Image (spheres, helix red, strand yellow):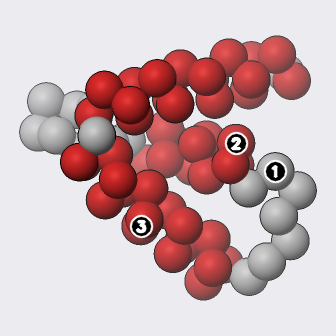
Amino acid sequence: MTESGELPEEEIGMVVDCILIDYRGDLESRARVARTILVWAAEHPDEWDELWARCQQRHEALV
């Protein structure tokens, strides 16, 4: 999270990709998931940090 409490778009996108593996839905549905994640992350910053770390590890393993 940034100092202002906001999440960088890159982090959000990576977590959405991590959750929606091979999702072929429309962009609007993906945007709803991203907004829901933002709300959840604001309410649960510690859990967000854990989820972000897991998704980052997975992303690095796939690259």
Tag 3: residue type?
Answer: Arg
- Amino acid beneath label 1: Ile
Asked if 43 appears above or below 51 in the picture, the reply is: below
**To which quarter of the image does residue 27 belong?**
bottom right
Q: Position of residue 31 (x, y in %)?
A: 54, 73
57 is higher (above) or lower (below) than 17 = above
Residue situated in front as seen by the camera: 2 or 33: 33
Q: Identify the amino acid type marked 2.
A: Cys
Residue in the picture at 63% in, 29% down: 55
Determine the CA span between mark 1 and mark 2: 6 Å
For residue 35, the mark is: 3
Q: In this view, does 28 lie above or below 33?
A: below
Q: Is the C-beta separation of discs 1 and 2 under 8 Å?
A: yes
Q: Please name the residue that numbered disc 2 is placed on.
A: 18
Rendering coords of residue 22 (x, y %): 88, 56
Q: Decide: few, some or many residues near mark 2? Use Cα within 10 Å; few <14, some 14-19, many ≥20.
A: some
On residue 63, the disc is none
Point out the tag, 1 or 3, that comes first from the N-terminus: 1
